[in-house]
Every structure is written in structure tokens, then in C-alpha cells.
């Protein structure tokens, strides 16, 4: 393939950089400060990228920027590419980073968000070993024993240094096979006809039904899971309809292993926090990994309607 053909296939890189910063911060002004540009310049770059893709990448709301479905896809790819480039730049110093880093994270987050990214870091830093612990319940004593923890909640745990890593939303999802059998039924009727998969209790589905403007729906053979990772696995296998967490399941959606049923998304009541014990771990490797993960921090889809069909 010639250079001109390759250039035509690549999105414009300066607009991509501006978009990635705006998406990560959820703000044009914050992106402008990071890039030492004016807000007008960042807005112009973002619009240029939207023109390239032929669709909106953000919805502008009173609370800030909200990624559309296409915007989430572009953001995920951009972050991955920038992380790989950052890893290449650090390879010359990678032999200086050595040690074992212990990370605690909830299973769903670990399986579908952390591990794919951690693999890239490991390739660039071959002398860093990892010990990964799954956190399924509130265990403050465990968080004191680890170097880094991903916490699902409404605040950074006491005695920890940390920041918001991402906010999430929940949207009804099903397997492609189940989706093919559904047809064009209205949401309320569809939920009555199929098994409902719950995480923890029935409240999140009730909240979604209320937001969608339909009465609470309870199927006669609903299943309740205390682990959302198991619930999503059951959904992939066609056992029912679940509320999937965006952006954690973006990979499953892009791979076609899950599909969204309705455009209504429910803002989750909590956020994922990136934390570490305070006083901070003295391990150099732990500090490097923490700073690297901090680069992924962004406020995700803030709620409301998905801007595009899946």
C-alpha cells in the first residue's frame, strides 16, 4: 500500500489528540489547558474529527461533554494507541522498573478493562510482575495490603490517595441469539417474555424501568447474581437479559458477543476509583503503574439516551 493510500485511511492526528484529551477530561477547557491551546482551537479540532467520521462524537450537556456510542469507540481506540506509543517511549527505561505490584479490582472491571491494558504495560516493562486480587465484597483490610486498588463506590476509601477513574452507565443487553428471537416487542412486553438477570438485587432493573417510563417488570424465573462478571457470562450464553455496564463491556459489544436492546441508559449510582494506600507505597514499580493507570482517567457516559444504535 502506498503512502498516500495509508494517509487517506488515517484520521487526522492533531484532532485525534485534542478529542482524546477532551474525552478524558470531559471538558474542552480542561483539554485546552493540558495541550496549551485555546478552547476555540480544541473545539475546532474536535469538529474536524467529527467531520472525518461523519457523525457526532460528543453530546454537549449542561454538566459537560458526553461521548456518543461512536465517540466511545473512537476514544477507546485512541487511548489504546496513545498508551502503546507511550509504552514504546518508555521502553528504553523499562529495565529500570522492576518489582512486584499487587492490584485489587472487582472481577468485571478486571476481566474486561484492566487485563487488556495491563498486558500492554507488561510488554513494555518485562521486569514488572503482577499479583492480581479480585474484590467482590467490601474488604478494607485487603485494600491496605495492596499497592493499587480499583474501588467501586461513591468516595475514595479513608486512608487512601486516589481519584475518579471512570463513571459508568448501564444498558439492557442480550446475546445475539436471544436478540434474534426477540423481534420488535415493546420494552415492557419483551422483559416480561424473557428471563431477567439481576446484579445483587432487583433495584437496578426497577430504576431502569422507571427511567424508561415503564412499570416495574419482574419475570417469573429471574436470576440474581452477587458477581456482575458471572451475570454477564450468563448473558453471553443466552440465559437472559442483563443490565451491562458501559464502558466495561464495550469490547463484548464490538466483538458481537453482546448486543444492546434499547437506547435508554441508566447512570450508575457509583464510580470506579483508582486508589493506593496513603502514605503511598515506596515501591518504584507501584508508582509507575499507578501513574500509567491515571492516564486512563475519564468521566464516561453520564447517562440518558445512547446517541446511536448499537
Image (cartoon, helix red, strand yellow):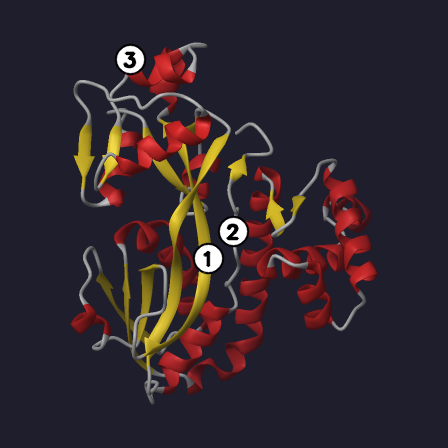
Residue beneath disc 2: 300
Q: Dot 2: what SS?
A: loop
Mark positioned earlier in the residue sequence (3 or 1): 1
Residue at 45% across, 64% down: 164
Which circle marks residue 193 in the picture? 3
Q: CA distance from mark 1 to mark 2?
A: 6 Å
Mark positioned earlier in the residue sequence (1 or 2): 1
Query: Which one is nearer the viewer's eye here, 128 or 26?
Result: 26
Q: Seen in the image, is 60 located left or right of residue 83?
A: right
Residue beneath disc 1: 166
Sort mark 3 into few (<14), some (14-19) or many (20+) by Cα contacts within 10 Å: some
Where's residue 31, x and y in %? 68, 64
Q: Are marks 1 and 2 in contact (CB under 8 Å)?
A: yes
Mark positioned earlier in the residue sequence (3 or 2): 3
* Quadrant for the N terminus in the image: top right
Q: Measured along the vertical axis of the image, is residue 195 above or below residue 66?
A: above
Amino acid at each position: 500500500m502506498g503512502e498516500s493510500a495509508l494517509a487517506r485511511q488515517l484520521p487526522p492526528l492533531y484532532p485525534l489528540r485534542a478529542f482524546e484529551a477532551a474525552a478524558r477530561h470531559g471538558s474542552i477547557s480542561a483539554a485546552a489547558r493540558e495541550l496549551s491551546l485555546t478552547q476555540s482551537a480544541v473545539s475546532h479540532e474536535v469538529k474536524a474529527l467529527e467531520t472525518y467520521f461523519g457523525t457526532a462524537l460528543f453530546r454537549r450537556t449542561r454538566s459537560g461533554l458526553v461521548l456518543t456510542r461512536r465517540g466511545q469507540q473512537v476514544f477507546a481506540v485512541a487511548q489504546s494507541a496513545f498508551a502503546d506509543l507511550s509504552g514504546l517511549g518508555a521502553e528504553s527505561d523499562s529495565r529500570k522498573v522492576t518489582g512486584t505490584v499487587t492490584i485489587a479490582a472487582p472481577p468485571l472491571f478486571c476481566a474486561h478493562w484492566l487485563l487488556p491494558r495491563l498486558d500492554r504495560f507488561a510488554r513494555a516493562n518485562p521486569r514488572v510482575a503482577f499479583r492480581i486480587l479480585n474484590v467482590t465484597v467490601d474488604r478494607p483490610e485487603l485494600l491496605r495490603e495492596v499497592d493499587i486498588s480499583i474501588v467501586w463506590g461513591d468516595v475514595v476509601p479513608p486512608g487512601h490517595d486516589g481519584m475518579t477513574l471512570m463513571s459508568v452507565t448501564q444498558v439492557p443487553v442480550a446475546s445475539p441469539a436471544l436478540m434474534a428471537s426477540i423481534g420488535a416487542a415493546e420494552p415492557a412486553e419483551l422483559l416480561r417474555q424473557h428471563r431477567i438477570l439481576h446484579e445483587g438485587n432487583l433495584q437496578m432493573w426497577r430504576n431502569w424501568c422507571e427511567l424508561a417510563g415503564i412499570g416495574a417488570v419482574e419475570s417469573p424465573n429471574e436470576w440474581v447474581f452477587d458477581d456482575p462478571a458471572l451475570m454477564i457470562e450468563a448473558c453471553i450464553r443466552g440465559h437472559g437479559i442483563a443490565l451491562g455496564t458501559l464502558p466495561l463491556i464495550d469490547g463484548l459489544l464490538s466483538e458481537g458477543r453482546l448486543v444492546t436492546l434499547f437506547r435508554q441508559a441508566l447512570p450508575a449510582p457509583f464510580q470506579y476509583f483508582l486508589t493506593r494506600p496513603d502514605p503511598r507505597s515506596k515501591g518504584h514499580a507501584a508508582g509507575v503503574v499507578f501513574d500509567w493507570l491515571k492516564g486512563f482517567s475519564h468521566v464516561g457516559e453520564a447517562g440518558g439516551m445512547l446517541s446511536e444504535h448499537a
